Image: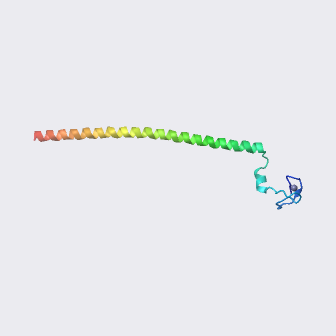
Amino acid sequence: MNVCKKCGFSIPEGVLFCKKCGTPVQSIETDEMDAGLTIEELTKYSLDMRELSDHMIATYVKAVKKMELELDKVKIEAESTISKLERKIREYRLKRMQISSLVRKLF
Ligand SMILES: [Zn+2]
């Protein structure tokens, strides 16, 4: 049995409006959700959730920035390795040309 929040009149289960004053009866779901929590507690809870989600977003943004920096570092290292290899290949081709022209002169 519920009690009207406005006038205190007893309201049988399943009735949606107070028979005395016409105030709508809160749904049972809402009653269960809010069970034992005051407005201050609910406000604090929602602020805590807000703070937590802000914190999670900040952490995520920081992690993405760190990953981007590391990717840049890897990219720079890879580019330097590639240019070193390209230089080695050029040196090798030059040496091979020198050797083959030397062989041609000899024979
Ligand atoms: Zn009432």
Give the image location of residue 44, x and y in percent: 73, 42
Q: Nearer the viewer, residue 59 or 39?
A: 39
Give the image location of residue 10, x and y in percent: 89, 57
Q: Compared with residue 4, is residue 37 higher up or lower down, i.e. above or below? A: above
When asked about the image quadrant of residue 40, the answer is top right
Q: Compared with residue 31, is residue 92 higher up or lower down, i.e. above or below? A: above
How is the protein colored in the picture?
rainbow
Q: Is residue 106 left or right of residue 80?
A: left
Image-quarter location of ligand 1: bottom right
Q: Nearer the viewer, residue 102 or 57?
A: 57
Image quadrant where one finds the C terminus: top left
Give the image location of residue 80, x and y in percent: 36, 37
Image quadrant where one finds the N terminus: bottom right
Q: Is residue 34 left or right of residue 68?
A: right
In this view, the residue farthest toward the left is 107
Q: Residue at x 25, y 39 (%)?
A: 92
Q: Nearer the viewer, residue 68 or 77?
A: 68
Q: Residue at x 63, y 43 (%)?
A: 53
Q: How many marks?
A: 0
Q: Residue at x 73, y 43 (%)?
A: 43
In this view, the residue farthest toward the bottom is 14
When asked about the image quadrant of residue 78, the answer is top left
Give the image location of residue 76, x and y in percent: 40, 38
Q: Residue at x 22, y 39 (%)?
A: 94
